[in-house]
Image (cartoon, helix red, strand yellow):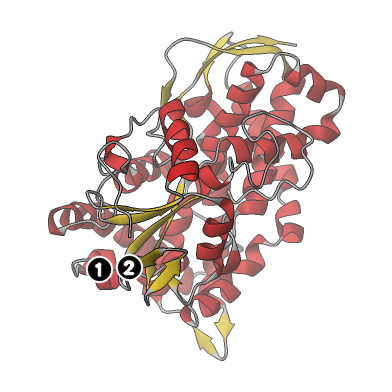
């Protein structure tokens, strides 16, 4: 068994994108499966190995409750969080909610997504300097998901505060929260659970034409979801329903800014936009790692990983794997066989992928149509790339048509 030396572990890496990508490249070559004693995890870096982890839900579990300190508010949120469920509970929850996110159903949202995008662009008032995240990339997906759930979009600053508190990396070394961190999370989750539970109970009394009411009424195998199960899913949508889209939209704009002529090419041929978005998803993977817990001893070649161990499957590294992608560090908008793993793989493939793709496609198309020029200005701020690849703040200089 090989243990990483100081300098190759997660905590030793700077959080900027260039440093993280350099780390991925080194580890894919030297230690593609490696033990990080300081972080208390195993890392998996190559595409084939990451895909194996995501594909085998029996051996690589998404349920981390056995490793976490018990806490009522955290446990309540996890109860309905399908990202943290294994079969058969995962199948029950996913069957109920997947009908709302099929490509056909999501396609019907296109007129409303376009209208919200235009409203947000109009609200910029023709300003030549905007801040993409605050002005468009965050409010667009939050408004869409809030409308789907029947929740006031005016509460979106609250959703953002919850997300900042719960998904911010904990110094990138402690992936299973200790008792102190669990208590801090519980404070936020208590507020979020109470908010969601009140909304769910109101829909039991007065159903409306929204996703929350559909979840309240839905049945699988003759059983309905408990309020606590719905709380976890509604809360998950409010958090995860915007993180990927917000990051991806900023990543597309940043990529176009770095490649002269790319925006003009898409204006001339809008049909190429979906493929360009897929390539940005590969190059700038919004959520860098996917975490699993081993349920049994497992081997990767010479490496023996014991049961009960946290494994970080690095999607962002897999998407740059030279063994899977030709010239992986180059932006190739029309790349064929783009088997990126940015939305996961296997039973936990992202339910919201069709919606995220739709939102970003419409937003970028509208921006290209209404702006003849756009460039990234000074003052951009980015997430720690060991967790999220994307901008916290992205100032733009734009010229309106």
Q: Position of residue 381 (x, y in %)?
A: 41, 22
Would you name the residue on which mark 2 appears? Answer: 64
Where's residue 163, x and y in %? Answer: 37, 45
Residue 361 seen in this snapshot:
yes
Residue 67: quadrant of the picture: bottom left
Q: Quadrant of the N terminus?
A: bottom left
Mark 1 crowdedness (10 Å alpha carbons): few <14, some 14-19, many ≥20: some
Q: Using the image as rendered, state which of residue 30 and residue 359 is in the foreground.
A: 30
Q: CA distance from mark 1 to mark 2?
A: 6 Å
Mark 1 lies on residue: 67
Q: Nearer the viewer, residue 187 or 322?
A: 322
- The correct choice, above or below, for 219 with respect to 13 in the image is below
Could you tell me which residue is drawn at 55 percent across and 64 percent down? Answer: 52
- Which residue is pictured at 63% across the width and 17% down the height? 257
The answer to whether the residues at label 1 and label 2 have Cβ atoms under 8 Å apart is: yes
Helix, strand or loop status at disc 1: helix
Residue at image location 34% in from the left, 57% down from the top: 195
Q: Is residue 272 above or below residue 306?
A: above
Question: Circle 2 sits in a helix, a strand or a loop, which is it?
Answer: loop
Nearer-the-camera pick, 70 or 80: 70
| Residue 200 visible somewhere in the drawing | no
């Amino acid at each position: 068994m090989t243990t990483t030396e100081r300098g190759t572990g997660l905590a030793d890496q700077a959080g900027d994108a260039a440093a993280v990508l350099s780390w991925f490249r080194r580890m894919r070559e030297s230690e593609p499966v490696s033990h990080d004693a300081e972080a208390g995890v195993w890392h998996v870096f190559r595409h084939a190995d990451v895909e194996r982890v995501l594909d085998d839900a029996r051996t690589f579990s998404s349920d981390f409750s056995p490793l976490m300190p018990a806490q009522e508010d955290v446990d309540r949120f996890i109860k309905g969080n399908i990202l943290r469920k294994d079969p058969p509970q995962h199948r029950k929850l996913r069957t109920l909610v997947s009908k709302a996110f099929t490509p056909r159903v999501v396609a019907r949202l296109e007129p409303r997504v376009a209208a919200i995008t235009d409203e947000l662009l109009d609200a910029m008032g023709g300003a030549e300097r905007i801040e993409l995240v605050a002005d468009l990339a965050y409010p667009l997906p939050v408004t869409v998901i809030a409308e789907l759930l029947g929740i006031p979009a005016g509460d979106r600053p609250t959703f953002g505060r919850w997300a900042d508190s719960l998904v911010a990396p904990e110094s990138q070394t402690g992936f299973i929260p200790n008792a102190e961190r669990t208590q801090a999370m519980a404070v936020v989750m208590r507020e979020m659970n109470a908010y969601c539970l009140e909304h769910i109970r109101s829909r039991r009394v007065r159903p409306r034409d929204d996703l929350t009411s559909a979840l309240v009424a839905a049945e699988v195998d003759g059983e309905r979801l408990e309020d606590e199960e719905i709380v976890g899913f509604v809360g998950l949508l409010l958090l995860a329903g915007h993180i990927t889209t917000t990051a991806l939209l900023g990543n597309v704009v940043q990529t176009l800014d770095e490649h002269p002529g790319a925006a003009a090419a898409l204006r001339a041929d809008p049909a190429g936009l979906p493929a360009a978005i897929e390539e940005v998803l590969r190059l700038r993977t919004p959520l860098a790692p996917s975490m699993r817990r081993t349920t049994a001893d497992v081997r990767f070649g010479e490496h023996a990983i014991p049961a009960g161990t946290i494994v970080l499957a690095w999607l962002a590294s897999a998407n740059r794997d030279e063994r899977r992608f030709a010239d992986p560090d180059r932006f190739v908008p029309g790349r064929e066989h783009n088997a990126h793993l940015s939305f996961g793989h296997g039973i936990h493939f992202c339910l919201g992928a069709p919606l995220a793709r739709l939102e970003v496609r419409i937003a970028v198309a509208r921006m290209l149509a209404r702006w003849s020029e756009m460039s990234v200005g000074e003052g951009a701020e980015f997430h720690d790339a060991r967790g999220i690849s994307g901008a916290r703040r992205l100032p733009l200089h734009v010229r309106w048509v």
